Amino acid sequence: MRAQRVWNVNGAASIGQLQSKLDDLNKRLSQLENQHPESLGIDELKASALSLSREIDDIRCAEATAALGELLRK
């Protein structure tokens, strides 16, 4: 059975948007850790940051796989 892509890769724009969100999230996380080190929101922000970073990695892997596929077809 052949694997099928579940989402459409939107390229650099999508990665740029996600990276920007991740940067903002990391800034808020850093501020919260400095101001309220025992805040319950820290774990939620960390989970969101991890989720965004995984999404970025998934897109980059899909792009690399597509590029490799193109090279192998040649």
Image (spheres, rainbow, N blue to C red):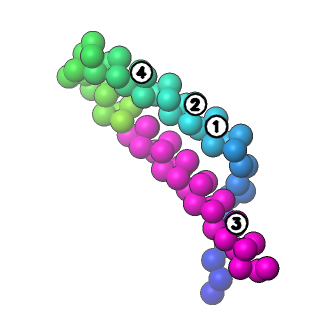
Mark 4 and mark 2 lie on one chain; the one further toward the N terminus is 2
Q: Which residues are magenta?
A: 47-74
Depth check, mark 3 against mark 1: the one in front is 3
Query: Label 4 crowding class (10 Å Cα cut-off): few <14, some 14-19, many 20+?
Result: some
Give the residue furthest to the top.
Answer: 35
Which residue, given by chain and number where applicable, does mark 2 sit on?
20
Q: Which residue is mark 3?
A: 67
Q: Position of residue 12 (x, y in %)?
A: 69, 44
Dot 4: element = helix
Query: Mark 4: which amino acid?
Result: Arg
- Vertical comparison of 39 with 70: above or below: above
* Callouts 3 and 1 close, C-beta under 8 Å: no
Real-space CA distance between mark 3 and mark 1, rounded to the nearest whole angstrom:
19 Å
Image coordinates for residue 55, horizontal then vertical, percent: 54, 49
Secondary structure of residue under mark 1: helix
Disc 1, disc 2: CB below 8 Å?
Answer: yes
Q: Residue furthest bottom?
A: 1
Amino acid type at image mark 3: Ala
First of labels 1, 4 by sequence position: 1
Main secondary-structure element of the magenta-colored stretch = helix
Circle nearer the viewer, 4 or 2: 2
Question: In terms of sequence position, does the residue under pointer 3 or pointer 4 come before the other?
Answer: 4
Please report the residue visible at 71 percent of the width from the left and 49 percent of the height from the top. 11
Q: Decide: few, some or many residues near mark 2? Use Cα within 10 Å; few <14, some 14-19, many ≥20.
A: few
Residue 48 position in % (x across, y down): 43, 37
